[in-house]
Image: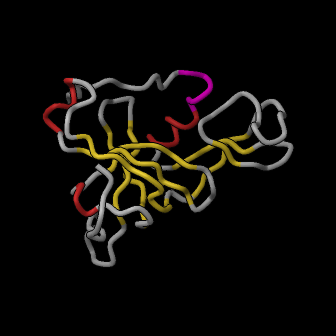
Amino acid sequence: MSYDKPLPDVDDPLTRPFWQGLRERRLTIQRCGRCGALRWPAAPICPECLAPGAEWTDVAADGELWSYVVYRRALSPAFADEIPYAVGVVALDAGPHLLSRISGPVDTLKVGARMTARYEDVSPTVTLLRWVTESPGPENGGGSSGDHND
């Protein structure tokens, strides 16, 4: 397996549980031990009640496309062979919003589309989160046609 693009630091103590969850095909985010608020990105204190620390909890890896952008010029030369590609913010059914790449055709994306997570192993230690549009058929990755934000 050869992946020549930038990789996250999966050993960062603040986000290690998130990356470990992705390796295990789980979406896990922080929950405040005091007020119960779910949060992402990971933080050392709760933005709602300012309590320190958090527990990590699994959440359903489904949500709604809240916003997205289609890159027609690569952000980095490492991604030049993938243009056009989309990056989107998905509002999880559990509440928090996650930013990640979207797999599939970029011209079928529509804000409000139902999304589900896919896990892509890109190295022996790194699994990345990708979003795909939910499809009523046996294949995932279809989606609704309509306007998109380029």
Q: Which residue is drawn at the image coordinates 13% and 35% (left, top)?
A: 81
- Would residue 128 appear left or right of 64 to someone viewing this image? left
Query: Which residue of the protein is positioned furthest toward the bottom in this rendering?
Result: 136
Quick check: 61 above or below 57? below
**Of the pair 124 and 34, the residue shown nearer to us:** 34
- Image coordinates of residue 18 in percent, x first then y, are 55, 37
- Residue 148: image quadrant is bottom left
In terms of depth relative to the viewer, which is nearer, 147 or 20? 147
Q: Quadrant of residue 75?
A: top left
- Residue at 30 percent across and 34 percent down: it is 122
In magenta, the rendered stretch is 12-16
Q: Residue at x 48, y 26 (%)?
A: 10
Q: How is the image coloured?
A: secondary structure
Describe residue 10's horizontal placement relative to residue 42 as left or right: left
Q: How many marks?
A: 0
Q: Quadrant of residue 136?
A: bottom left
Is 121 displayed left or right of 53 in the figure?
Answer: left
Q: Is residue 121 left or right of residue 19?
A: left
**Which one is in front, 26 or 71?**
71
Identity of the residue drawn at 28% across and 68% down: 146
| Quadrant in which the N terminus is drawn | top left
Determine whether 88 is above or below 132 in the image. Answer: above
Question: Which secondary structure type mostly characterizes the magenta part of the structure?
Answer: loop
Instruction: Say if the magenta span includes residue 99.
Output: no
On the image, the x and y values in percent for residue 79 come to 21, 31
Point out residue 127 in the picture as x, y percentages from the top left corner. Answer: 38, 38
Q: Is residue 138 above or below residue 148?
A: below
